[in-house]
Amino acid sequence: PQDVIAAPAGDSLYIMPDFSLVDPAYRGLPRIVVDYPFHHFTDRFGLVDAGFNKSQRVELLREVSNVWIRGNIWVRFKTADARDPEPLDEGRADAYRWWVMGEKNRSMPSYQRDFDTILAHGPGELGDALARNVTNKLIKLYNGHALLNWILSIGGQKKPAIFTHIYTVFYYRWYNGGRTGSRIFVRSGACSGWKKRLPGTGQEVECNSWDMPTESALDPAEFARILAHEVGHSFQLTHPPGRCQVAKTVAEMDLMRQQRAVTVAGTPCGMQNPFSKHARRLHPAQLNHARAQAEKLAARQSAFYARFPGLQTAARSPTEQRAFELYSSA
């Protein structure tokens, strides 16, 4: 992709990182630009909506870019992607509400809870047949993201993948986030801590923390760390060996360690470690490996943009389906 060093109006198209953060060892090397479409959502119940406002989302994505710009890799996000949510239709909003709130009732199988009142005959009126299709996706949930993918209208993986797409939702079934193929998922909220209320009723949304009682309300710094970490996995970086890194300072805490496996002296490793959300360090070997992988991703995207230049200058990133259709049509 074209290396846009400065936009005429700051963040008018892309969220601009702090280019002064490039490590001196990489300043003489070509800048590698890799685009990451960012998707967040809204629904009539306000349940899927991101836990951060527009300005926060822009600044958190800028923080992620600032982590990787140290290796002269511009992990690039479009400003409109961060600011403008994608709406769920009412049937998918019903399914998301059912998925989240049904977890609170452990006295019956998941696929039977609130089937009539919330899923089949909620405001979206999915009806019995489509609602049963949704329950089938929940039954398959533990083998993948079948239900969540349907709720977000992203379906199965599109290959070949031109971009790694990022999806964020408030309530997320898998603890912090993760990468599946060419997709990154990251939560922006939690089932414990601050909870949402259903509009018009004041009813607090109850869910079971998905059998993970340590899950807590998400700190913005934690969101940025999770996302920067998953971007590292998209560059084929792995978790370093060892159960716990005890760093001398916060600045030396390794980004690519799992959150429970990094700390500073005097504080044990663990999910509730207050320092791990600040882990940002990338070592030269990690940055060198990331640059090699980023070059491959950038070359693929450059070839795509050469065929469809309007997508690079468009305000919003293409959806997976749109990029796949364009690629397949040529």
Image: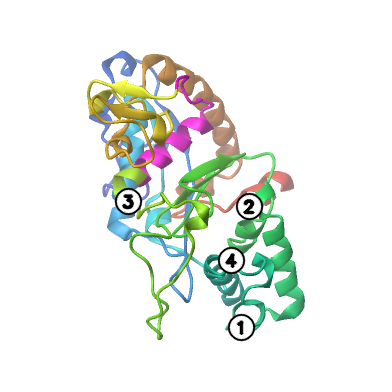
Q: Which mark is residue 145?
A: 2
Check disc 3 and report the residue beneath it.
58
Circle 2 residues within 10 Å: few <14, some 14–19, many ≥20: some
Query: For the residue marked with disc 3, what is the amino acid?
Result: Val
Mark 2 or 3, closer to the camera = 2
Distance (Cα) linking label 4 and label 2: 21 Å
Residue at x 46%, y 75% (from the top left corner): 45
Q: Is residue 21 magenta?
A: no
| Sequence-wise first label, 1 or 3 | 3
Image-based side of 104 in relation to 203, left or right? right
Check disc 4 and report the residue beneath it.
106
Contact flag, marks 2 and 3 (Cβ < 8 Å): no
Magenta-highlighted residues: 223-242
Mark 2 or 1, closer to the camera = 1
Query: For the residue marked with disc 4, what is the amino acid?
Result: Arg
Q: Secondary structure at mark 4?
A: loop
Distance (Cα) linking label 2 and label 1: 24 Å
Circle 4 residues within 10 Å: few <14, some 14–19, many ≥20: few
| Sequence-wise first label, 4 or 3 | 3
* Residue 251 pos. (x, y %): 24, 26
